[in-house]
Image: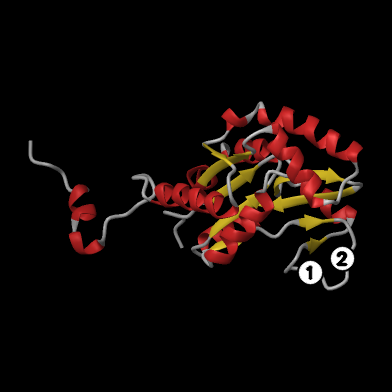
């Protein structure tokens, strides 16, 4: 299937800004949007299934794939390696699905660089940065989660300042509001991207596409 009209959606945000919630909302409301399954070297947790939650690889297999250039992006997190295969993304796009990647700022930069080397991915790529309305609100959201110590929260806030400085690297900026409003804005972006002339197609019944290819009289 042609990739025409399909989107590779990269969403980034500082920790606590709400990108995971936004991704979950988008996936729940749009069955044609698929989460790219990530490869990892960490052991499966109870209930996790290979090929559904993650692709679980041995460290050796993961490294071999890195050396073969098979990953769209990869990173080491808390002692384990994670990465998204190019084949995973391209297969889903060719099956007629939009593909959603939830990445940090560095991961998004890696995907942009990789897509620049492959026309199919470049044509599908749309990047969105989700920013909090203020640092005070971001701190409040991090504290509300109740999962981090005060020291870790300050580390996350410092990292957020670095990430926020790179917002201009993305195609779109959403200033986070409510969960419902963030999702609405994301849907508006995707709808507009699908109607771009480079992705859209006129109905065959109009007969315009074929006619446009015919030589015009001088």
Q: Residue extending furthest left?
A: 218
Q: Could you say whether the residue bearing mark 1 is in a helix, strand or loop?
A: loop
Looking at the image, residue 46 lies above or below residue 55: below
Mark 1 vs mark 2, foreground winner is: 2
Q: Which residue is at a point 49% across and 53% down the rendered structure image? A: 184
Left or right placement of residue 99 versus residue 39 in this view: left
Q: Which residue is at a point 73% across and 57% down the rendered structure image? A: 38
Give the residue at mark 1: 50
Q: Determine whether label 1 and label 2 are within 8 Å by CB.
A: yes
Distance of label 1 from label 2 (alpha carbons): 8 Å
Give the residue at mark 2: 44
> Which of 204/147 is in front?
147
Looking at the image, residue 5 lies above or below residue 118: below
Residue 28, position as x, y percentages in the image = 58, 66
Residue 66, position as x, y percentages in the image = 78, 46
Looking at the image, residue 28 lies above or below residue 146: below
Q: Is residue 91 visible?
A: no
> Which of 147/201 is in front?
147
């Amino acid at each position: 299937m042609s990739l025409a009209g399909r989107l590779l959606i990269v969403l980034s945000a500082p920790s606590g800004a709400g990108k995971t919630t936004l991704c979950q909302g988008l996936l729940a409301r749009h069955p044609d949007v698929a989460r790219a399954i990530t490869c990892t070297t960490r052991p499966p947790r109870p209930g996790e299934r290979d090929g559904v939650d993650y692709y679980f690889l041995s460290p050796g297999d993961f490294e071999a794939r890195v050396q073969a250039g098979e990953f769209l992006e990869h990173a080491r997190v808390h002692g384990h390696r994670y990465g998204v295969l190019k084949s995973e993304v391209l297969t889903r796009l060719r099956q007629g699905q939009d593909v959603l990647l939830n990445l940090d700022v560095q991961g998004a930069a890696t995907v942009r660089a990789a897509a620049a080397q492959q026309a199919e991915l470049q044509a599908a790529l749309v990047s969105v940065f989700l920013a909090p309305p203020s640092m005070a609100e971001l701190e409040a959201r991090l504290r509300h989660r109740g999962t981090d110590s005060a020291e870790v929260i300050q580390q996350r806030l410092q990292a957020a300042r670095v990430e926020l400085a790179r917002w201009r690297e993305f195609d779109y900026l959403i200033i986070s509001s409510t969960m419902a409003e963030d999702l609405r804005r994301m849907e508006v972006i995707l709808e507009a991207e699908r109607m771009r002339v480079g992705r859209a197609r006129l109905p065959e019944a109009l007969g315009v596409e074929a006619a446009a290819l015919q030589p015009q009289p001088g």
